[in-house]
Image: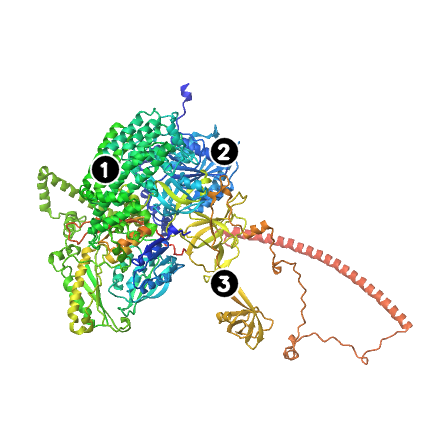
Amino acid sequence: MATQSHSLSYAGCNFLRQRLVLSTLSGRPVKIRKIRARDDNPGLRDFEASFIRLLDKITNGSRIEINQTGTTLYYQPGLLYGGAVEHDCSDLRGIGYYLESLLCLAPFMKHPLRIVLRGVTNDQVDPSVDVLKATALPLLKQFGIDGESFELKVVRRGMPPGGGGEVFFSCPVRKVLKPVQLTDPGKIKRIRGIAYSVRVSPQMANRIVDSARSILNKFIPDIYIYTDHMKGVSSGKPHAAALLPPGCSLLALGPVSPILLLSPPHSLPQAPVGWRRSPVRSGPILLHSAASTRPRSCSCVIFAGGCIDSTNQSLGLLLMTLGQQDVSKVLLGPLSPYTIEFLRHLKSFFQIMFKIETKPCGEELKGGDKVLLTCVGIGFSNLSKTLK
Amino acid sequence: METKDQKKHRKKNSGPKAEKKKKRHLQDLQIGDEEDARKRNPKAFAVQSAVRMARSFHRTQDLKTKKHHIPVVDRTPLEPPPIVVVVMGPPKVGKSTLIQCLIRNFTRQKLTEIRGPVTIVSGKKRRLTIIECGCDINMMIDLAKVADLVLMLIDASFGFEMETFEFLNICQVHGFPKIMGVLTHLDSFKYNKQLKKTKKRLKHRFWTEVYPGAKLFYLSGMVHGEYQNQEIHNLGRFITVMKFRPLTWQTSHPYILADRMEDLTNPEDIRKNIKCDRKVSLYGYLRGAHLKNKSQIHMPGVGDFAVSDVSFLPDPCALPEQQKKRCLNEKEKLVYAPLSGVGGVLYDKDAVYVDLGGSHGFQESDEVRPTHELVQSLISTHSTIDAKMASSRVTLFSDSKPLGSEDIDNQGQWMPKEEKQIDLETGRVRRKAIFGDEEDESGDSDDEDDEEMSEGDKLDNGSSADESEEEVDAEMTDKVYMAGKGVKRQRLEMDEDSEVDLPAFADSDDDLERSSEDEGEAEEADESGEEEDSTAGKRDILESSVVGDRSKPRLLQTDGLSDGLNLENPLTIKKATLTTSDSGHCTAEEAFASEDETEESSSLSTEGEDSENEEVIRKKFPKSSKVASGQRLGSENLIDETSDVEDLLKEEEDYKEENNYSTETSGALKWKEDLSRKAAEAFLRQQQATPNLRKLIYGTVTEDNEEEDGDTREELGGLFRVSQPSGECKHKLDSLDCSRFHVEAPHDWDLEEVMNSIRDCFVTGKWEDDKDAAKILAEDEELYGDFEDLETGDVHKGKPGPDTQIEEVEEVKEEIDPSAEESAKKKHLDKKRKLKEMFDAEYDEGESTYFDDLKGEMHKQAQLNRAEFEDQDDEARVQYEGFRPGMYVRIEIESVPCEFVLNFDPHYPIILGGLGNSEGNVGYVQMRLKKHRWYKKILKSRDPIIFSVGWRRFQTIPLYYIEDHNGRQRLLKYTPQHMHCGATFWGPITPQGTGFLAVQSVSGIMPDFRIAATGVVLDLDKSIKIVKKLKLTGFPYKIFKNTSFIKGMFNSALEVAKFEGAVIRTVSGIRGQIKKALRAPEGAFRASFEDKLLMSDIVFMRTWYPVSIPAFYNPVTSLLKPVGEKDTWSGMRTTGQLRLARGVRLKPNKDSLYKPIVRQKKHFNSLHIPKALQKALPFKNKPKTQAKAGKIPKDRRRPAVIREPHERKVLALLDALSTVHSQKMKKAKEQRHLHNKEHFKVKQKEEEEKLKRQKDLRKKLFRIQGQKERRNQKSSLKGPEEPSK
């Protein structure tokens, strides 16, 4: 039945997650060739292999074929199964790498997903677990995915390179999704955040908070940044170079659409080596500068922001696509390259095209230009869910 | 005389008039002023019992809630597709007659032979597609899935037939469309009473099947072989006003009931191999949901296919435009049935005939036929694909002739797509026409010429066709613009014995095509947003013109014209220019794109691009000379770019002018005006918007068909492929997969003004006017300022002074200042609206329930759905939301089995059912199934059976199971008789909740009810959990106290190891556990039991063995069977059928045979009580049975007495005497008894007499006593006189 023309073919390892996730949801097999074919170290990396293993765990009947060099991957999706799963993620990427895809798949399982992910909770590359918790979960709630069992919990924090963090994620199952109209981002009413620190002095987190406040206070006085200092078992695995930078994530809350979510990127400027060696001496200064750059990039995010922050753009667009055959609208900031590619993939997997209108910013000082994306859902229904 | 004839006046007893009178009467009596009894007599309606009141309230609420349906979003399009009316019934019941009558009723046309669906316009807002359904179960199943309304014909003289019930059941399973019964043959009843009775009986039976109160229509008798006009008219009214509730399956899947089929296969391929797979195009109205291009579809009776192309066509049977009139005029009463040869096209196996009489505006007769040699030679040529396609276009256009202008707007747009199908394979590519820069300049003259020509054709219709033909040829030689003409000429040739009108047609088509291309071009330009044309657009045009080219030479050859070669040279040159222009545009575009895209590096060398573009072009047209010329003209183009937009605009204007001209000259081509104007408008509109993001993301829309090629560049999207150097491409392929978007901060956030740019994002920033708190407060003040205290009667004025004063002042001002007046008006309106909102809020809040809210939400969503894409033209709309229901679409499908075309029978419906995501995949489908109560047999696991699920009909092998209390799915050998059971089969994945039915066979006619089972899909999975029971037995070979060694249950120690700890049991019920394997014999193990076993015990273990389902999925390909044998499809046979056919008898197990039961008498041993126990027992419980008296020993035995003869005599005498004596005594006793009896009787008599006497005496006594008492009483009454007597 599944004819050859039915399957899609791609090249390169980029956007592997998108392809596999969309393939799983659409039921179309996918073939990915030339994965790092020209690289010195060809084929799939550990973290990708781990991701594929995770997909295998949460699906039933999927067929995965990888050639000997690991440069070609054929994936024939099965049905999403869910249930209680545990997975050890690769330490090369953060848990966010895996969690992002799980957020796309979790509402369409046969059994509600309850998964324990172990690995790196916060790193420089991927959106950290805190960010996803603060931004993606409220976004999913907009689409009618809600309930008591809908939670994301950071049990332990683990930093690269050692890892050792643990996250618990559970998500209820839905048959259909609600269409959304998120066209008004509203005003930012308050700013909440979390500053975490692991294996450093708890004072560091406080300093971050202070310096962040000093900048953001110019915009709005209602700022509250929690400090989260984990120690002992819940601070991950110790490592040789185990002086880990504290981090901070902020989110701004608006009144109209409660999901005006801004999560500043975690890109803490790579701490100089000297700092790592002797934190006591030059730490605070560096920390301060780091913290002040972060709210600055935060303002940049606000400048670019729409109703969904840039990390979750693709998630929002996917859920819009998978809605009922109704019109969904969402106002976004500038589309990230990842999202642009995602839109293309949506077109090839679901034959869905978004109407894209640029909304230039008027007289109001609301930051950069926005993009209004509109689509008609494909009338997706959860084929895995059992009818009782 | 007159007075006699007049009827006596009768008083009205009911109706409004009577009521009025009654009321007046009551009012006269002074009691009627309150008509409501509740008000008049409130005491009678006072609450008697709170409980009862609560109950009645609950009841009314329950009833109210029961009426609610779950609200759904209304997704019906503005112009809905025709309603599918299935006319169903057993043979000879009058289906065809009814259809004919209905069509005649609606359209005043009489169709003699009806094949396939007939679409008619039945009213201002409704169209019907009527299709007949025979009693082939395949057809019944298919049509039940697409039907909106079923007219179920029932022969009243015969009663219900099996088909009717079968169809009802099919309908029930597949969503239950509206069903209306129609009783026919009512004239065969002689007696009225019998007729009435039959009607009533049938009606009630019908009601039990459908729903109580379902409409049953009576057609009383025929007149001249037709039903009575009035009745048909009524029936038609019923159909036209009927309302439908959306069915889940139908609204969630797109589907098409095809009313036309064309074979597009290359004739050469067919010639080579007549059995080659075909490429067909199917036409029909799209219904249900939106259809996406390239989606999967299923054709019931044929199989699964991927849509290779979809395009929408002008509506061949359009609804009339909105008018104020009540009824349709003759021209609007359209009928469209291409399979029956109505509506302009007569379908034949290998040709298409155009019928232009009847409903169309053309009045020319068919008499004039092309007689010229040339044309005849044209006719005799074998038709090619191009020709066929061309012909299809003609027919379509002819259909759409009477359409309104707005429909025709779309007309221009379907052509390019059709064209696109043709690949560029041959060397003829180079002989193509141009739409490039040259065309822009010469467009004017071209068009005019065309116009003229069409005019000419129109004018001299009488003249023979070849004349116009020559004209065309002449033009072709010196004109640049050629493609359409080539097509046209083929069309001519194709339409074998077509009419004189055709040239005119073809011409108009030409224009259409051309303008469509132009429009396409314009649109492409729009998309790019700035001043370039898109590559793809050009390419499109190239392709389309190539089509023309390719077809043309062939023509020329056949014609024997020599100028074919002459044509080639100019063409090549022109093409070359075109290609260069292409590349030029590309550069501009890319530059722009790179500007736009922030994350792209802007270091794109134009040279590289150029070369790449050339590559692309080379790929398309492998011609070196062309490239060279391209380079030559490259510089030219750079200059052209700047003035491109101007050119385009000029072009548009030119078109407008042309069109005006054309409208003036020929009224028939009015549509053109709209077309180009619209294109221009669209262009300008999009120019302004500059939505280049779309292009950036999706590339050019028209080139999506390549996306499945899997090219490395493909996946990067249309534009990226062009704009990116290959090195960067590679880099991107393997770059880090991360969703984070590092916004390169372009601003220095420390600066105050930069920081201010996001100031308004915060609540502390500035607000919009309508949300600003201060303003809202002020407005509220204004609104609520004045109020009146109801209790005291005080009137409070908020801000009394200034407001009114100002208003007064304003009044004066208003006269001078119109804007102030306007603002005041606006203010007033605002105020009014606010008040209304308040009122609504106050009064509706109490009423609005959860249900109302839900409904409102759905309604809002529906409105949004409608409004979102309303203002866009169809071409763009189709890209976003897919083809919307109600459109007339043409679907191309490739690799269709040749039998579909060879054995095509228009009587059988062709349905294209769209499949959702992953509905094309296979897996295990679990469902709840119940054998139909009317099906005679039970169903057996692993017997192949035909299911109808979703769109599909297929044969598969199900397993039946039942779920145990612990969730275990236990295999059943047979379906239970009157119970649901589970069933699992391997087959196509269908959404949960879909109904299904099963039939054992679809071939032939069975006397019994054919539907074997019905049910619903519950679950989909890729594995199954059905198990069957397996008992393993073993025997003890060594028994200790509680431990035994068991052998014979397993074959190896490994097997034992797997079952360690498992529970085992003996037949007698002793439980135990497997402990450990023993070394010898193989497979033996040690087990412990709760009691000591016997050697005769059998030990067994109960296990569950998972069963597997054979992966057998066999679609019913009934449409591929030869004509007339379509209902003979038979798939895999059951084992029973095979045995029957082969004559193989099943060897039954001897133990399973029934034998006569012989019961042996049971002998019980006597009860033995041990001596010790006996001793202990109390006496009463001690066994009393004495031991049998043993033989008396000899010494104790008394000797026998032997009498002497004398003694014997004495004894005899004594015996005799005693006998006599006893006899005597006996007699005496009897006598005494008698005597006693008599004495007793006498005594009794005496006693009675005595009693009687006593009674009399007593009576006397009492009487005297009574008299005495009475006397006493009397005297006591007289007491005062004589107190003492």
Which of discs 3 and 1 lies nearer the camera? The answer is: 1
Circle 2 residues within 10 Å: few <14, some 14–19, many ≥20: some
Question: How far separated are the C-alphas under marks 3 and 1?
Answer: 78 Å
What residue is shown with label 3? B1105
Q: Which mark is residue B438?
A: 1
Residue B447: image location, x then y, percent:
25, 33
Q: Which mark is residue B1220?
A: none
Circle 3 residues within 10 Å: few <14, some 14–19, many ≥20: some
Q: Nearer the viewer, residue B210 or B897?
A: B897
Q: Residue furthest bottom?
A: B1195
Residue B89: image location, x then y, percent:
48, 39
Q: Residue furthest right?
A: B1206
Q: Amino acid at mark 3?
A: Tyr
Q: Secondary structure at mark 1?
A: helix
Q: Quadrant of residue A191?
A: bottom left
* Protein chain holding label 1: B
Taking the image as drawn, is residue B177 in sight? no
Q: Earlier in the sequence, mark 3 or mark 2?
A: 2
Q: Amino acid at mark 1?
A: Glu
Q: Amino acid at mark 2?
A: Leu
Question: How far separated are the C-alphas under marks 1 and 2?
Answer: 73 Å
What residue is shown with label 2? B186
**Labelled pair 3, 2 in contact (Cβ < 8 Å):** no
Q: Are marks 3 and 2 on the same chain?
A: yes
**Image height check: is B583 above or below A276?**
above
Residue B940: image location, x then y, percent:
53, 54
Could you tell me which quadrant the C terminus of chain A lies in? bottom left
* Protein chain holding label 2: B
Is A349 on the left-hand or right-hand side of B1226? left
Question: How far separated are the C-alphas under marks 3 and 2?
Answer: 61 Å
Which of discs 1 and 2 lies nearer the camera? The answer is: 1
